[in-house]
Image (tube, rainbow, N blue to C red):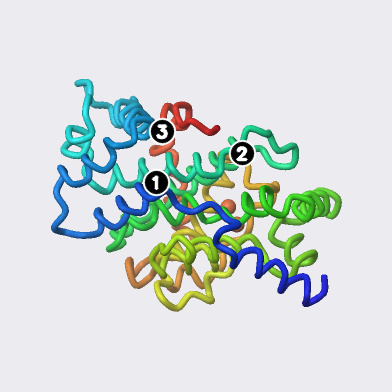
């Protein structure tokens, strides 16, 4: 692919009006939940304006995943019981999946399986962050959920190009990442990072998306990127959903060095420990996967 084509792609990505914007409510919730002065009442008032969102969030809050015996009937109640961060994650998940939903089912790309892979990565990231006591664990879920969002942008906005990429992935038995590099010169990682920038998401989340296949390049928060890199691999190891190819990438050795700062005895054998923790998390999560509305 020539340089002009790459520039063209970059231009398409750069045009914010071409891409879906993050719903205002979600953007407001993201901002409010990061402000320590926000009250449950403030958040509840914003969510409650959107009836569809309220219903979806309450359905998730009442799922067996959280296991509360009593019915949670209002957003305020859900906020008290589950906390700001969990509700923010639920709002973000619901809203992002809805934003990219389409009535036409792409033959190239199964959206449900894509979101399952992404949710798998988000849950793995949460599990690893907890095990390592990573300080800003609130960000890992969101970074994990949208780490591959570039693939959905390619499918919806540059469909013909994406069909070529998927074909090459199958024909040459290579990863989507590799096929993208060969065909476009850029990958879903950079495309996803552009979207994160357009959505004004924190810079470290944008970086984690950008470098989830090349974690060595991270400079803002290498630990967050390392966690997302590992979580993507964990989600693939457990065959959760489908990330677009059957390749399980090898763990970049740099992540062990980066994460040693959180746990001094960390080494590559820890992958097995993370897999076992993730297995336990998945046992609780089955129901959660089922009730997400993927359309
Ligand atoms: Fe990826
Ligand atoms: Fe992935």
Q: Is mark 1 within 8 Å of ligand 2?
A: no
Disc marking residue 285: 3
Q: Nearer the viewer, mark 3 or mark 2?
A: 2
Residue 231 point in image, percent of width and height: 49, 53
Split into 4 quadrants, where in the image is the C terminus?
Answer: top right
Q: Residue at x 37, y 35 (%)?
A: 53
Q: Mark 3 touching mark 1, by CB under 8 A?
A: no
Q: Earlier in the sequence, mark 3 or mark 1?
A: 1
* Label 3 packing within 10 angstroms: few (<14), some (14-19), many (20+): some
Disc marking residue 10: none
**Residue that carries the numbered disc 1 in the rendered image:** 92
Q: Residue furthest right?
A: 171
Q: Residue at x 39, y 37 (%)?
A: 280
**Separation of disc 3 and disc 2 at Cα?**
19 Å
* Label 2 packing within 10 angstroms: few (<14), some (14-19), many (20+): many
Work out whether 117 lies above or below 139: above
Name the secondary structure under disc 1: helix
**Residue that carries the numbered disc 2 in the rendered image:** 111
Q: Nearer the viewer, mark 3 or mark 1?
A: 1
């Amino acid at each position: 692919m020539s340089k002009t084509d790459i520039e063209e792609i970059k231009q398409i990505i750069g045009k914010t009006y071409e891409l879906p914007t993050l719903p205002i409510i979600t953007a407001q919730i993201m901002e409010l939940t990061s402000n320590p002065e926000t009250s449950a009442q403030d958040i509840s008032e914003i969510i409650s304006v959107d009836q569809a969102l309220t219903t979806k969030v309450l359905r998730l809050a009442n799922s067996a995943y959280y296991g509360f015996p009593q019915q949670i009937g209002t957003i305020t109640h859900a906020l008290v019981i589950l906390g700001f961060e969990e509700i923010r994650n639920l709002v973000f998940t619901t809203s992002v999946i809805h934003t990219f939903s389409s009535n036409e089912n792409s033959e190239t790309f199964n959206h449900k399986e894509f979101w399952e892979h992404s949710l798998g990565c988000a849950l793995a990231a949460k599990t690893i962050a907890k095990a390592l006591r990573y300080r800003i664990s609130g960000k890992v879920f969101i970074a994990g959920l949208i780490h591959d969002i570039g693939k959905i942008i390619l499918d919806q906005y540059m469909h013909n190009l994406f069909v070529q990429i998927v074909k090459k992935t199958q024909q040459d038995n290579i990863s989507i990442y590799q096929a993208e590099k060969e065909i476009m010169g850029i990958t879903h990682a950079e495309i996803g990072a552009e979207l994160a920038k357009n959505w004004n998401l924190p810079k470290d989340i944008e970086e984690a998306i950008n470098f989830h296949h090349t974690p060595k390049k991270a400079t803002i928060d290498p630990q967050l990127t390392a966690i997302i890199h590992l979580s993507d691999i964990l989600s693939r190891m457990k065959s959760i959903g489908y990330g677009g190819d059957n390749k399980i990438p090898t763990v970049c050795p740099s992540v062990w060095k980066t994460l040693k700062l959180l746990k001094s005895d960390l080494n590559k054998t820890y992958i097995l420990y993370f897999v076992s923790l993730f297995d336990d998390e998945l046992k609780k999560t089955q129901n959660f996967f089922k009730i997400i509305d993927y359309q």
